[in-house]
Image (spheres, rainbow, N blue to C red):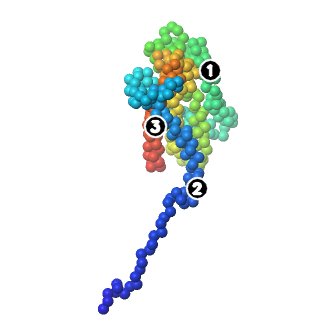
Amino acid sequence: MRAPSSLAPAVSAPTRRPRPAPWRSAQARFALLMVAPGLLLFTVFGLYPLASTAYLSLTKYDLLSPPRWVGLENYRQLAQDPVFWTATRNSLLYLLVVPVLVLLPLVLAVLVNRPLRGVGLFRTAYYIPVITSSVVIGVMWKWMYASNGLLNSLLAGAGLEGWVKAALGFPRDHIAWLQGTADAPLLPLFALMLVTLWRYTGYYLVIYLAGLQSVSSEYYEAARIDGATAWQQFRWITVPLMRPYILFVTLLASISALQVFDEVVVMTGRPPEGGGPFRATTTLVYYLYEKAFGQALAIGYASAISLALAVLTLLFGVVYYRVVLRAGRDV
């Protein structure tokens, strides 16, 4: 007697058709066609400048003669440059504007997001500094910071001039906001921060307004029925729902603070007179500009500074990315 297995008809194994290469499918080709312009622009305006900067940072180049390879000499010199570390400190101190630029526009956006009479005028007024020229802003604030300017006149009118002068170390003279003193050497830097706060508050306010428009009014109506106060509505409804916008504004404000340049040049002057006094307002971008286009024409050294700034900015980007991922898991 034959085994049942031998009576079963022979079944041939299914033949596998060779799978086409992923890039040969119509969907893959269409996707590549769609992303090709973006990849091309990123390569031309992103990767190529980054690679060129990395190469120049390893050379000695003055725009007049061909680059000469020096290896890591620029980075060794950078590590021993006290002005570079002062500029790094000033750039990191400038990040103090970020919390204010994150919270103040959010509060203002909540206030002007109501159907009040004349609210459009307020929205326009807040945005005017954003579209105003840096030169105009610099001239205006230099006049406000002058010894006989508006700020000192307001302090004198309010009776606070003597107290502020004593606190900042100006016993007799008028307060020189862009000069500083031994007791307040970073006063010029903080004066520039105030200009940045005034200028960019309206920009981030518009971003928050766009986010608030997407929040349903049903949340607030339900909260009012439950007896929630305005602060409780802001704390438990507005802030959680606006979290992606808050994180986005945090990233933009951080990058802008690390790359501040206009305010320094317009209000303190170009190299070698600007960036002072005593390097009090010299930031990384300003020092980069000074080395690259000042009297030294040290393009290689300036490229090393720019890469150091890129690494610093990348660190904040990584922190931002991790915060976004963690916030996404909590939602």
Mark 1 falls on what kind of element? helix
**Considering only order in the chain, which callout, 3 or 1, is on the residue closer to the N terminus?**
1
Looking at the rendered structure, the kind of residue marked 3 is Leu
Where's residue 87, x and y in %? 45, 24
Mark 2 falls on what kind of element? helix
For the residue carrying disc 3, how many other residues have a C-alpha within 10 Å: few (<14), some (14-19), or many (20+)?
Answer: few
Check contact, mark 3 vs mark 2: CB within 8 A.
Answer: no
Specify the label residue 30 is tagged with: 2
> What residue appears at the point 47 percent right and 19 percent down from the top-left corner?
279
| Towards the viewer: 100 or 247 | 247
Looking at the rendered structure, the kind of residue marked 1 is Met
Specify the label residue 94 is tagged with: none
> What residue appears at the point 51 percent right and 12 percent down from the top-left corner?
162
> What residue appears at the point 45 percent right and 26 percent down from the top-left corner?
60
Mark 3 falls on what kind of element? helix
Mark 3 vs mark 2: in front: 2
Mark 1 vs mark 2: in front: 2
Q: Is residue 97 visible?
A: no
- Residue lying farthest to the top in this orientation: 172
Give the residue number, with chain letter if any, for mark 3.
314
Specify the label residue 140 is tagged with: 1
- Residue lying farthest to the front in this orientation: 66
